[in-house]
Image: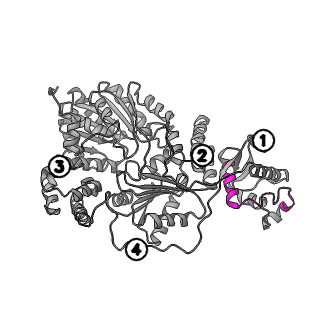
Amino acid sequence: MNAVPALATAPLEILHEVFGYPAFRGAQQAIVERVVAGGDALVLMPTGGGKSLCYQVPAIQRHRAGRGVTVVVSPLIALMHDQVGALDELGVPAAFLNSSLDGEEARRVERDLLSGRLVMLYAAPERLLTPRFLAMLDSLSERGLLSLFAIDEAHCVSQWGHDFREDYLGLSALHERYPQVPRVALTATADAHTRADIVERLALEGAELFVSSFDRPNIRYTIAEKTDPKAQLLRFLRDEHEDDAGIVYCQSRRKVEETANWLVAEGISALPYHAGLDGDVRRRHQDRFLREEGLVMVATIAFGMGIDKPDVRFVAHLDLPKNIEGYYQETGRAGRDGLPADAWMAYGLADVVNQRRMIDEGEAAEEFKRLQRGKLDALLALAEAHDCRRVRLLHYFGEQSAPCGNCDNCLHPPATWDATEAARKALSCIYRFRQHGDTGFGSGHLIDVLRGKVTDKTRQHGHEKLSTFGIGAEVSEAQWRGVLRQLIALGHVQAEGEWNTLALSDSARAVLKGEVRLQLRVPSEARRGSKTTRRSTGGTERPPPLPLDNEALGRFAALKAWRGEVAREHNLPAYVVFHDATLAEMARSQPHTLEALGGISGVGSKKLEAYGREILRVLGA
């Protein structure tokens, strides 16, 4: 067994020397100290909160103390590549083992692992549990060179969570096989039920729980009623995010392809991403998104976990996610650099019906379906809310807060109306359909009857003669859609069969009797007028992360050009070399010596040694 040095480098010294940061943020220090001391930890920290430092700093510290390698469990090849590339830039020996390596490359990594040279090794859970890999871990353990297990995206172990991965279930074997090795499990999203599941499935009963604030104050949340979703998305992109990098989420592969092609036709740089694409195409598209500026990725939820790109300025949803955890995880990919970003979503009645049907028609046990319905209800309540979005979002994760002043409802408080009588009229009309001998109709026809609109269908079925024909003429079509969304969301109405025909549930009786009140937001009408024209940016760059005068702006542009050359040479995303915020501070302060340059946040010792003189040259020092 290797001798352990009497003194090892303190975590704060590692943070400054390796990563170039002057201090830990939030709970990072407490987490690092717990893990360095050999304790287990379960870490819940929002995307962009600095989760990776919570195991990278302990990994370096424990390696320097002679305790060997940290094994990082990660579900995505692309994330492993970027993490290892970033660590290499920092001078930290790290590697990954995955299917992208050929035989000789994999054997070289294995030799480095067994020699104890590596500080960190990244591997997917399915590889980690193979006999060959476990034999290598056994060898390290016997020599006292197995330091730490870091389980990233730990919510994947929970069947109650939003992104269950069956391979994660086997990770409890790590504790059984190597009980002396500490573990840190990390995730950005987990409600109380999912947290309990993580603890049970990973045998983390003795772990200290660290829950950071889920608030991402730089993200503005906006949820709009679907009217013409493509036109709404285009307005959002052109008015607020022209030439910005962002993600547009769609539910189906077909819709992803159609939306990406449509955006390209509208002059917006966009690429599709979904599990049905060839693996090489997916990798190519993801690499372009990470390395290029101003690209829009249109994707299913197959895209995004572990995406470290800091300057994603918006995440848009054209379809309703399944639950708040999924929504939070996906929107959290915006604004990782702490600068202003948008989470924009359009949703409508069809979204509510489709999500309900997917749950009801699934093959899961009834207990699972019941929990999923509850999660969907919470998301629908967020979408229909007329108070602060952020307060509701944080409350879901058990965090109390005050109105944020930065969501759509805070900035433009919606008008509300008492929809109780309208709801009773809608339920009465559905009842009259059945009483009339009809098997049921969808929402469009129901609204036509309520508003007294004569159509071929109303004539065909004699619905002009119903007592409910025209009883809701004073309510707009948009308001009726809101009423039906809420009635379905609350479970008072069910959409049945292939044609989504509406039927009353048992709880509708209480609404009909006036025992249930319904207060709804007044829908905002779609803006009308001439088509928005694409604005020209005249080739100007996106504003820097902090205010700069004209001379500093020139230095910032020169630094970005230099960074781009280095990134291409090293085959890395530009932000892995330096973040925009670090370049902006260099441009602002214009250091003239290596010592002064080393004092800028984000400039560690290895990067100072590798790039310091070149940066001073670019700055004209």
Q: Is residue 307 left or right of residue 383?
A: left
Q: CA distance from mark 3 to mark 4?
A: 38 Å
- Please state the extent of the stretch shown in magenta in the rendering: 462-486
Residue type indicated by callout 2: Ala
Give residue 272's mark.
Answer: none
Q: Mark 1 or mark 2, which has the lower sequence index?
A: 2
Please state which of the two labelled residues, at mark 4 or mark 1, is closer to the viewer: 4
Query: In this rendering, does residue 497 appear at all?
Result: no
Q: Mark 3 or mark 2, which has the lower sequence index?
A: 2
Q: Mark 1 or mark 3, which has the lower sequence index?
A: 1
Give residue 598's mark.
Answer: 3
Residue 584 falls in which quadrant of the image?
Answer: bottom left
Q: CA distance from mark 4 to mark 2?
A: 39 Å
Residue type indicated by callout 3: Gly
Q: Mark 4 or mark 2, which has the lower sequence index?
A: 2
Residue type indicated by callout 1: Arg
Q: Mark 3 or mark 4, which has the lower sequence index?
A: 4
Q: CA distance from mark 4 to mark 1?
A: 57 Å
**Crowd band around label 4 with a 10 angstrom C-alpha radius: few (<14), some (14–19), many (20+):** few
Q: Picture coordinates of residue 544 (x, y %)?
A: 31, 60
For the residue labelled by badge 1, is the local secondary structure a helix, a strand or a loop?
helix
Can you identify the residue that label 2 sits on? 381
